[in-house]
Image (cartoon, rainbow, N blue to C red):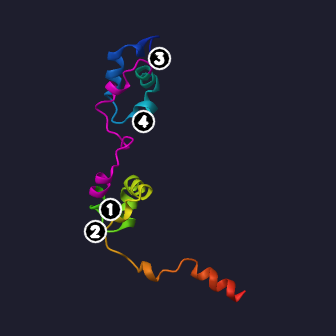
Amino acid sequence: MTRKKSGHWDNFENCKKDALKYQTRSDWQRESGSAFYGATRNGWREICCAHMKRRYKPLGYWSYERCKVDAKKYKSRSEWQENSGSAYIKAHLKGWLDECCSHMEMFGNKKSHKPNQHTKAQKKAA
């Protein structure tokens, strides 16, 4: 790759043309950092990246309704957690997990589960 002249990435058209080669921001930043930082420095990054896919949902994306809709795609909590971890974590942190998972199959019996059952038995034997 040849070195660009000083000020090359201070031109909007140069940054935009370079950005079109990439599908994600991280790819553009990794493969063509000077162009990426030129666009950032000049306030053009959002315009240059408008065509790119986002790998992550924007901050605040996972609302109660979106979590419920997303959870409907899965049959169990573990399947939801594995395939859509950010939605699952948001529902857990906000206390929405039971409502979002109400349609899911229950595996095992929560009422018969006794936490620390084995450690108590081990303590008695000691």
Labels 3 and 4 touching (C-beta < 8 A) = no
Please name the residue that numbered disc 4 is placed on.
26
Please name the residue that numbered disc 3 is placed on.
3
Give the prevailing secondary structure in the magenta stretch. Answer: loop
CA distance for labels 1 and 2: 8 Å
Q: Does the magenta stretch include residue 66?
A: yes
Mark 3 vs 1, N-terminal side: 3
Mark 4 vs 1, N-terminal side: 4
Amino acid of disc 1: Cys
Q: How crowded is mark 4: few (under 14 residues within 10 Å), some or many (20 or more)?
A: some
Task: Identify the residue at horizontal 32%, vertical 25% (top origin).
Answer: 47
Q: Residue furthest right?
A: 126
Mark 3 vs 2, N-terminal side: 3
CA distance for labels 4 and 2: 37 Å
Task: Identify the residue at horizontal 34%, vertical 16% (top origin).
Answer: 12
Please name whichever residue, 17 or 97, is drawn nearer the observer in this view of the structure: 97
Residue range (magenta)? 41-69
